[in-house]
Amino acid sequence: MTAIRAVCVYCGSSTGVDPIFAQAASGLGKILAENRIRLIFGGGSIGLMGTLARAVLAHGGAVTGVIPQFLVHHERMLADAQEMIVAHDMHERKRLMFEKADAFVALPGGIGTLEELVEQLTWAQLGRHKKPILLANIAGFWDPLRELLDHMKALGFLHSFSRLNYLIVDNVEDIVPALRKAAARAAEPATGDADVLGRL
């Protein structure tokens, strides 16, 4: 995989208390549209999710939403998206988002955003995929998580820490270039990468 055609963005169903988060979501939406990168997102019209998706649409971009049936009304499904998939449950939602995406970006968010991000980090650590994973560290939002991961490593709980290999940028303008560079690197022939699970 060398091209980034679709990016799954995890983010909050609220906007948070700092306006910079919504500004970042809107800015990323514009950038994705301008680069003709399809947005894969959680399907809601509220919070950062809605801000992001509406920005993509406003600039002529493509949006795929994936929302579980029980959240259709709670998160106010974004009816304007070109493609909207109503999944049976959260597990199907996450699987579909994974399958449709070439890379993953985590904007600020809550427990759901954290859970989705950590799942992708786990799968990458276990060698199940090499899709780029990027933390959009807006206003230092993800600094506590980075500290926690370093803490886990220091205490001997992250033996395959190098395979987490996540990206971190502070500004949305740097997201697409970082993803493209990582995707090109991942496409290079692996050396001594057989049986990664056996080395955990």
Image (spheres, helix red, strand yellow):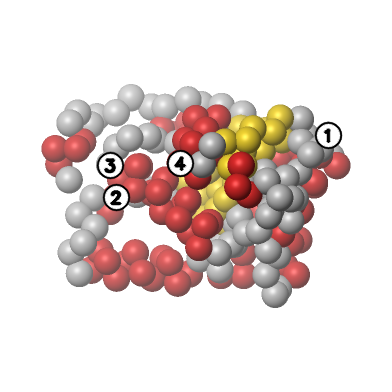
Give left or right: position of 89 versus 40: left
Q: Earlier in the sequence, mark 2 or mark 4?
A: 4
The number of numbered discs placed on residues in the rendered structure image is 4
Mark 2: few/some/many CA within 10 Å (<14, 14-19, 20+): few
Asked whether the residues under the numbered discs 1 and 4 touch, taking CB atoms below 8 Å apart as contact, a structural biologist would say: no
Residue occupying image coordinates x 19% and y 37% = 197
Amino acid type shown at disc 2 = Ser
Q: Reply above or below: 21 against 119.
A: below
Q: Nearer the viewer, mark 2 or mark 4?
A: 4
Q: Earlier in the sequence, mark 3 or mark 4?
A: 4
Asked whether the residues under the numbered discs 2 and 1 touch, taking CB atoms below 8 Å apart as contact, a structural biologist would say: no
Amino acid type shown at disc 3 = Leu
Q: Residue furthest left?
A: 198
Q: Secondary structure at mark 3?
A: loop
Q: Earlier in the sequence, mark 2 or mark 3?
A: 3
Residue wearing tag 1: 60
